[in-house]
Image (cartoon, helix red, strand yellow):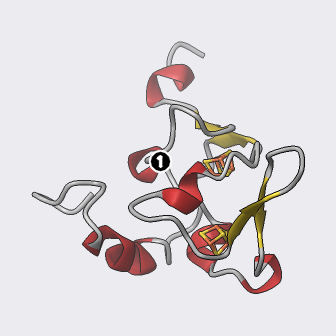
Amino acid sequence: MVIGMKRNNPMMKIIRVFIYLKPIDKTRYGKCKRCGSCCKFTYACPFLIYDKNEKAVCKIYGIRTYVCSKYPLSDKYHETRDVCGFKFKRRSDFSGR
Ligand code: SF4
Ligand code: SF4
């Protein structure tokens, strides 16, 4: 995270365009539960809708940005970790093997 800037600061949306140029952390596992929480981070995306099963649907899925498709990039930038289906192995998980 940028020093001194809170995660929910709208400026983080812009800064993430550059941060997300990095590759996805290799320790990521799990899958998207389509909760839609990351599409509502800082503000609700106008392309977010919900189907009849209350699963999130992106109206522009095929052309969504790489920031959307790579979320969550790493544990550091995993703002919705409490509800997200993706997780990251912590360094301590690898120790003692
Ligand atoms: S463009 Fe689609 S994937 Fe990206 S935040 Fe909006 S609804 Fe979510
Ligand atoms: S927060 Fe995680 S589980 Fe929910 S829509 Fe985003 S990537 Fe999928």
Indicate the amino acid at tag 1: His
Q: Residue at x 59, y 76 (%)?
A: 46
Residue reaching furthest to the top? 96
> For residue 1, which quarter of the picture?
bottom left
**Looking at the picture, how far across and down is residue 96, in whole percent?**
53, 13
**Number of marks in picture:** 1
Q: Residue at x 26, y 74 (%)?
A: 11
Residue reaching furthest to the left? 4
In this picture, is 63 found above or below 72?
below
> For residue 18, which quarter of the picture?
bottom left
> Between residues 42 and 7, which one lies in front from this camera angle?
42
The local crowd at label 1, few if under 14, some if 14 to 19, many if 20 or more residues have their Cα within 10 Å, is some
Residue reaching furthest to the right? 52
**Looking at the picture, how far across and down is residue 42, in whole percent?**
38, 61
Quadrant in which the C terminus appears: top right
**Looking at the picture, how far across and down is residue 72, in whole percent?**
57, 54
Q: Is residue 39 left or right of residue 91?
A: right
> Between residues 1 and 55, which one lies in front from this camera angle?
55
Of helix, strand and loop, which one carries label 1? loop
> Between residues 75 and 37, which one lies in front from this camera angle?
37
In this picture, is 91 found above or below 47?
above
Q: Residue at x 51, y 31 (%)?
A: 82
Q: Is residue 40 left or right of residue 11?
A: right
In this picture, is 56 found above or below 22?
above
Answer yes or no: is residue 69 visible: yes
**Looking at the picture, how far across and down is residue 68, in whole percent?**
61, 70
Label 1 sits on residue: 78
Residue reaching furthest to the bottom? 63
Q: Residue at x 46, y 44 (%)?
A: 75
Answer yes or no: is residue 72 visible: no
